[in-house]
Image (cartoon, rainbow, N blue to C red):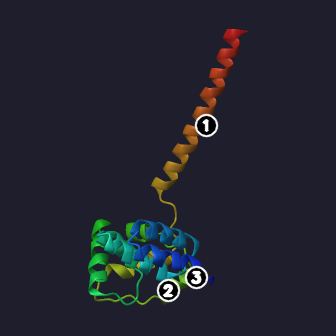
Amino acid sequence: MEKIPVKTIKKVEEDIEKNDLGKARDRLHGLISTYPDELEVRRKLGDIYFALKYPSMAGRYWYLEKNKTPEMVEACIQFEESMGNDPIRIARALKFKGDNGIINRLQLDQEISPLQYKVKEKLTEELDDTLGDKLVTIGCITILILIILFTLIGIYALFSWVF
């Protein structure tokens, strides 16, 4: 597992000290995409969102936290409610792209929500593309083909009209 550069962490901490939470948030989002296995980055991002008064978003990033404070628990419940208490939607919203072994080793508190175990199962499963995802992909490809086709027909019509 790669370690996060200390220089980047210091920049995030400096941004927090300067009360530039938006910049710190953006840096942490970049770190999550680069180092998805580092759950500490998710916790810090949850702290930022909580400070920005977005408890539902804070709950999204605190969801995988082992030892939750009461504020974290409440934020996680708000996040679940914002996702309609649907484990599949919650798992997709978490956007965890790291090692599934981390999720398997994760011990979730049962007293918080029974839904968390279903979400954990969904995260460990391979989330197959749903029919809706496939239809969106097919639709985009079809539109692209039609644009190219109509462009070629237009060019042909223009040349046949000019010449």
Rendered location of residue 99, percent (x, y): 57, 80
Rendered location of residue 14, percent (x, y): 47, 76
User: Residue 113: in sight, yes or no?
Assistant: no
Residue 55 higher or lower than 71, as above or below: above
Amino acid on which the number 2 mark rests in the picture: Asn
According to the image, label 1 marks what residue?
Answer: 145
Q: Which mark is residue 6?
A: 3
Measured Cα–Cα span from mark 2 to mark 1: 43 Å
The residue depicted at 47 percent of the width and 59 percent of the height is 130
Q: Earlier in the sequence, mark 2 or mark 1?
A: 2
Q: Is residue 162 left or right of residue 38?
A: right
Amino acid on which the number 3 mark rests in the picture: Val
Q: Earlier in the sequence, mark 3 or mark 2?
A: 3
Residue 150 higher or lower than 48, as above or below: above
Is the residue under label 1 in contact with that under label 3 (CB below 8 Å)? no
Q: Is residue 40 left or right of residue 19?
A: right
The residue depicted at 42 percent of the width and 67 percent of the height is 93
Q: Quadrant of residue 97?
A: bottom right
Rendered location of residue 64, percent (x, y): 42, 81
Measured Cα–Cα span from mark 3 to mark 2: 28 Å
Q: Residues within 10 Å of mark 1 (few under 14, many from 20)?
A: few
Measured Cα–Cα span from mark 3 to mark 1: 47 Å
Q: Quadrant of residue 6?
A: bottom right
SS type, badge 3: helix
Q: In this view of the protein, which residue sits in the foreground, 137 or 43? A: 43
Q: Residues within 10 Å of mark 2 (few under 14, many from 20)?
A: few
The residue depicted at 58 percent of the width and 33 percent of the height is 146
Please identify, in this view, whether the residue under mark 3 or under mark 1 is nearer the observer. 3
SS type, badge 2: helix
According to the image, label 2 marks what residue?
Answer: 104
Amino acid on which the number 1 mark rests in the picture: Ile
